[in-house]
Amino acid sequence: MSESLPVRLNHDRLHDIQTRASLEATDSFPVLLHNGDAPVHVHLHLDDALSAVASIPANNHFVDADSTRQVSVEIEDGGPRPVEGQLKIVTGHGAETDYVSVTVAEPDEEDGVAVDETLAERSGGDAEDAAADGTDDSGFEFPDVSVRRNAPVAVLGVFALAVAVGSASLSDSVAVLAGALAVLGSVVAAGYLLVR
């Protein structure tokens, strides 16, 4: 956003307007209405040249005593540049009038952020290197990926084996014992396939 335009109201006398003679802006800017010790009505108006590239949401503003009101002058992107025009400031329903010459200029090239092709390149950072060699900055070694992926299956196998052994020891049935041996064989086979 461009620099603001300060406007002092009711400073020396009632309805008095004090502001800069000119302002150069590259984009939208705020008009700061600093009021003195009496409430005032302020009318802001853009001439035809400025109205082609800028707008004010509302033209009439009430500013209370000893307060500041900010009014934004919105400048459209992509409009013709440069444009010169007048911002008209009126107080007290026409009691005082002042003009500010406003120039809407092209934005400086350095206002934007320069991005070159190296920003899009993926950096081979330390985290990737650490993941590749299986360590992090603290020297901790990560388990092999296959072990981490198969850990839930191994835990379920151990749980199934514990249930089978518990059932076989609590029951005097030959069928339960045969089932426990079948579970034991399945867990051993699954463990062999996981490790392979």
Image (cartoon, rainbow, N blue to C red):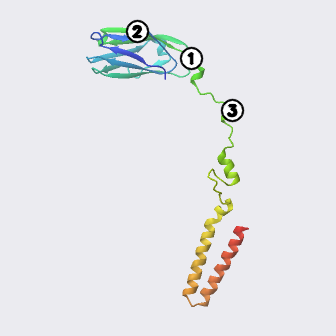
Residue beneath the point at 36% across and 18% down: 33
Amino acid type of the residue tagged 2 in the rendering: Tyr
Amino acid type of the residue tagged 1 in the rendering: Glu
Mark number displayed over residue 22: none
Q: Residues within 10 Å of mark 1 (few under 14, many from 20)?
A: some
**In this view, the mark in front (3 or 2):** 3
Task: Specify whether 80 is left or right of 129.
Answer: left
Quick one: which residue is furthest to the front in this view? Answer: 139
Q: Where in the figure is residue 65, as x and y percent of width and height?
A: 27, 20
Does residue 120 appear in the picture of this structure? yes
**In this view, the mark in front (1 or 3):** 3
Task: Specify whether 170 is left or right of 11.
Answer: right
Mark number displayed over residue 106: 1
The residue labelled by disc 2 is 99
Amino acid type of the residue tagged 3 in the rendering: Glu
Quick one: which residue is furthest to the left in this view? Answer: 38
Q: Where in the figure is residue 60, as x and y percent of width and height?
A: 34, 19
Give the alpha-carbon distance from disc 1 to disc 3, as whole Å.
26 Å
Mark 2 residue element: strand
Marks 2 and 1 in Cβ contact (< 8 Å): no
Judge whether 125 appears above or below 28 on screen: below
Mark number displayed over residue 117: 3
